[in-house]
Image (spheres, rainbow, N blue to C red):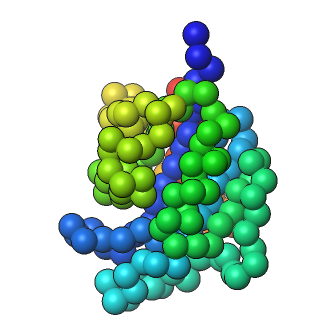
Amino acid sequence: MKNKTNLFWDLEFTGLHQNTTLISIGIVSDCGKTFYAESTSYDKPQCNEWINENVIANLFLKEGDNDYSLNRYRILGNKEEIKEALNIWLSQFEEVEMWSDCLAYDWVLFCDIFGGAFSIPKNIYYMPMDIVPVFKIKGIDPDINREEYSGLKDGAIKHNALWDALVIQACYDKLMQ
């Protein structure tokens, strides 16, 4: 039997439309390892005022901040550099189940990093998991404020992909109790 790792993840992108581009990705494993990347190649003209104020303002990597530790991976780079980094980071896990929140756009963009769904790393289960139906099944309004539900309100940097991944993990943990 393979050793399965749950990864909790979020992406930030330039808008809810067909041609949206990746701004950042944050992933937290159930064993405490993290991956965070900010794209230098997102389509800046697509960013409206809301995206600029709520997403771009919460980016924090600067040139030279890259950290290639498998426990705390950080990269500022273009899509190809993010793909290479993500492949390296994901390779440490034998089998991966991906958990997110309202992940329709996120999953498409995640697969796009690798060149499409058929090119994602083989250790990733091909069907992503979404916490929204779990809220519904548990009789909790799926529109509930995630930070309040998870208890992670202090120091929140909402709409930063790494912070949102931590919130998704905390929600998952509470839902699965």
Q: Give the vertical position of 89 relative to 40 (above or below).
A: above
Residue 170 at x, y percent in the picture: 60, 42
Q: Taking the image as drawn, is residue 55 in sight?
A: no
Residue 50 at x, y percent in the picture: 39, 82
Left or right: residue 47 compared with residue 175: left
Q: Taking the image as drawn, is residue 83 in sight?
A: yes
Left or right: residue 107 compared with residue 149: left
Residue 104 at x, y percent in the picture: 30, 51
Q: Residue at x 32, y 83 (%)?
A: 46
Residue 5 at x, y percent in the picture: 60, 30
Q: Residue at x 54, y 43 (%)?
A: 8
- Classify the position of the N terminus by image quarter: top right
* Residue 134 placement: quadrant: top left
Left or right: residue 17 compared with residue 129: left
Q: Give the vertical position of 161 relative to 87 (above or below).
A: below
**Residue pushed farthest top?**
1
Q: Residue at x 56, y 66 (%)?
A: 81
Residue nearest the viewer, comparing 31 with 172: 31
Q: Residue at x 21, y 67 (%)?
A: 18
Residue nearest the viewer, comparing 34 with 101: 34
Left or right: residue 4 compared with residue 97: right
- Classify the position of the C terminus by image quarter: top right
